[in-house]
Image: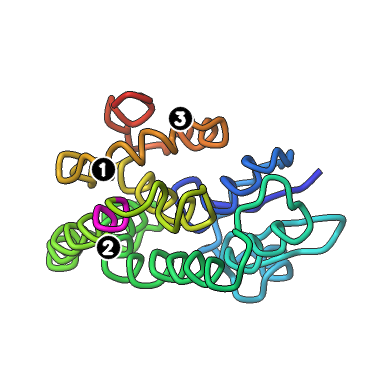
Amino acid sequence: MYRLFHVPLSPFCRKVRLCLAEKRIEVELVEERYWERDADFLRRNPAGKVPVLRIDGTHYAESGPICEYLEEVHRDPPLLPEGAKARFEVRRLVAWFDGKFFDEVTSKLLYERVNRKIMGTGYPDSTAVKAGAKAIKFHLDYMAWLLDQRRWLAGDALTMADFAAAAHLSSLDYISDVDWTRSENVKDWYAKIKSRPAFRSILADVVPGFRPPAHYADLDF
């Protein structure tokens, strides 16, 4: 049995959960209040961050390397395509969402509105929230441009790039911060990906003190 130390709305944890579920790997989920700097958790990951995946007594940290490890050990179904060029595009988009999208959007919306309250670090910074609300429009338009040319974000097959994007957007959708009317292509893509069995546990997440919108778990919006 694999054990994943996670936070429900963390997009990095959600990406790992989606990869595990897509590959039909059973995992025990353990919520970890990593900001409390528990000594046991710091022994698992000195960086003090989630996700951390435990496999046979060994702890694996950082969502990117974890997902790549799972891809190497559990090839079926593949979440990285064949060919160096195609793999590069997947990795580029994973880096886009976990880097640029996180810095410009997730950290300014989800982390301000939810994490501050949960961690007790004060009130949301309205300037940051406004910046995030503005930046997400650019990112949704970029996704729409990609999906005009492809069936999935990185090509014709579902890949890790789609799970990286869906992990961030699903976390933001939980707090109603995604305008699904902006692009029909993006909305259709998200409806398609959240209808997958791998998404079931994500849609069942409940965070005390925060109620998701009615459409959050609705597969047809």
Q: Residue at x 53, y 66 (%)?
A: 86
Distance (Cα) linking label 1 and label 3: 15 Å
Q: Does residue 121 belong to the magenta stretch?
A: no
On screen, residue 62 versus residue 203, left or right, reads right
x and y percentages locating residue 92 in the rendered image: 45, 71
Q: Identify the residue position indicated by label 1 in the image.
A: 185
- Picture quadrant of residue 51: bottom right
Amino acid type at circle 1 is Asn
Q: Decide: is 73 above or below 191.
A: below
State the residue in front, 48 or 21: 21
- Classify residue 177 as left or right of residue 151: left
x and y percentages locating residue 69 in the rendered image: 71, 63
Between 142 and 42, the one lying in front of the other is 142
Image mark count = 3
Give me the C-alpha separation between circle 2 and circle 1.
20 Å
Instruction: Estimate how packed mark 2 is, as few (under 14), some (14 to 19) or many (20 or more) residues with alpha carbons within 10 Å.
Output: many
In the picture, measured across the screen, residue 53 lies left or right of residue 148, that is: right
The 10 Å Cα crowd at callout 3, few under 14, some 14 to 19, many 20 or more, is some
Residue at image location 47% in from the left, 68% down from the top: 89
For the residue labelled by badge 1, is the local secondary structure a helix, a strand or a loop?
helix
The span picked out in magenta is 143-147
Residue 178 rendering spot, x and y as whole percentages: 23, 46
CA gap, disc 2 and disc 3: 24 Å
Q: Say what amino acid the circle numbered 3 marks.
A: Ser
Identify the image quadrant of the C terminus: top left
Q: Residue at x 45, y 30 (%)?
A: 195
Name the quadrant of the N terminus: top right
Indicate which disc residue 195 carries.
3
Where disc 3 sits, the SS reads loop
Q: Which residue is mark 2?
A: 105
